[in-house]
Structures are given as C-alpha cells and as structure tokens.
Image (cartoon, coloured by chain):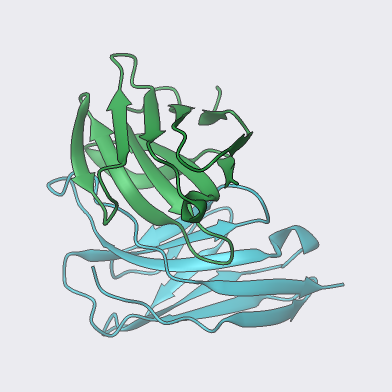
Chain colours: A cyan, B green
Amino acid sequence: DAKTTQPPSMDCAEGRAANLPCNHSTISGNEYVYWYRQIHSQGPQYIIHGLKNNETNEMASLIITEDRKSSTLILPHATLRDTAVYYCIVRVGGPNFGNEKLTFGTGTRLTIIP
Amino acid sequence: DAGVTQSPTHLIKTRGQQVTLRCSPKSGHDTVSWYQQALGQGPQFIFQYYEEEERQRGNFPDRFSGHQFPNYSSELNVNALLLGDSALYLCASSLYRAPYEQYFGPGTRLTVT
C-alpha cells in the first residue's frame, strides 16, 4: 500500500470548516483513499472513501486532486465532538481485491476550539 | 442492530500468561480483522479471518493466533505475554466482497505487568 503524509496536529474553531490535508504521491491506480477518525479511547470510525471523484456524505466531503497525489477531508461545520485523530489511508479496493488490511499512520490530531 | 462488540473491556495479565480476547462482528458481516494499538500510535494489523481461515497476516509473531467460528465471531489468543503486548486490541468487521467500510469495536485494553 502507498504511504500517506499528514500534519501531526491542527486546530479549528467551532462552527468553521475543518480542512485536513493528506499527501499520497505514490498512490496506484487501483488504490482508494480512505478516512477514519478515532475519538479518544474509542475504536476508529469510518468517515468516507474515494477513488478519483470527489465524494460527500452526511459526515464529510473528500476532495481528491486530479493527479490523485493528495486529498483533503472537509468537515463543513466542525463541532467539539469532531475533536479526534484523523487517519488518511490508501488501500487497494474494488470487488476483486477481497478485504485488504488497513495500514494506519499516526494521523492528524484535530482539536476543535470553542 | 448491534455493532461490533468486544469482550472483555479491560484485562490485566502477568508476563508469561496467555490471554483470549473475543469479538462479535456487526450483523451481516462475515470478515473479522484484528489490530493492535500501542499508546500514541495508530492501529497495526495483526490478522484477518474469513470463512474460518486466516486470510492475511501482519508482522506479528506466532504467539498471536486466532480463530473464527461458524457464526463469524472471532477470538484472538496471545501466548507467553510480554510487557510490550500491553495495548488496545481492536476488532473490525466487514463484508469480504464489499470491503469499503470496516466497522471497529470499542477495543479491549490489555495491560501486562
């Protein structure tokens, strides 16, 4: 799996959009970008994933650059409950790839400031 | 619909002992993966079970073994415990042929003294 690079920490004011960057310059054509977050003392929580198109769900938006070498997770209106460690993971995907493991880095510790 | 459940929540063991951790996957899921998370680190993949067989394995010694039962639940066994095995052990479940999301349980906190 390709490696990812994330800033170790970020702050964001409550109510503002939180933009979390991730670099994955060695990503391969069949690798997806996944985002998970881990709130203190809980298991990681799936947020969103994408291959090459921008994606949006009820939790967040994922913007992937055209060359797929970087992406940004956007939490549109951050709340205090969004304080967590956010992991960007690149992983092979698709129906012919079974269930590949997730390779976590150290992530970005996002702190929402009241 | 219950999510992924793990037991016990916390466990304290002594060096050299053996431990068994348990995981019940989310309803409808057939694949269970186990991860170890040391303090301050991201989770590290231990192994994955599907159809009662180990399908993938991370860089963990043979002291770590597992099992999956016909009802898809799973156990993680660790023999000859070391102080370095102290960690949060996470179980994740998913569908083998539709793996886009893995759902994690709350974890078991193992302390080895």
Q: Residue at x 60, y 46 (%)?
A: B113
Q: Residue at x 77, y 63 (%)?
A: A79
Decide if residue B100 is on the left or right side of residue B89.
left
Q: Position of residue A36 (x, y in %)?
A: 49, 58
Q: Residue at x 56, y 39 (%)?
A: B14
Q: Position of residue A7 (x, y in %)?
A: 53, 84
Q: Quadrant of the N terminus of chain A?
A: bottom left
- Residue farthest along the right direction in this orientation: A114
Q: Residue at x 53, y 38 (%)?
A: B105
Decide if residue B87 is on the left or right side of residue B92.
right
Q: Is residue A91 or residue B56 the one in the foreground? A: B56
Decide if residue A50 is on the left or right side of residue A7.
left
Height in image: A7 above or below B111? below
Q: Quadrant of the C terminus of chain A?
A: bottom right
Quadrant for residue B68, please give it: top left
Q: Position of residue B29 (x, y in %)?
A: 36, 28
Height in image: B107 above or below A111? above
Number of numbered discs on residues: 0
Q: Is residue B33 or residue A58 the one in the foreground? A: B33
Q: Position of residue B26 (x, y in %)?
A: 45, 28
Decide if residue B84 is on the left or right side of residue B67.
right
Q: Is residue B10 or residue A28 the one in the foreground? A: B10
- Residue farthest along the left direction in this orientation: A96
Q: Is residue A27 or residue A74 the one in the foreground? A: A27
Height in image: A25 above or below B112? below
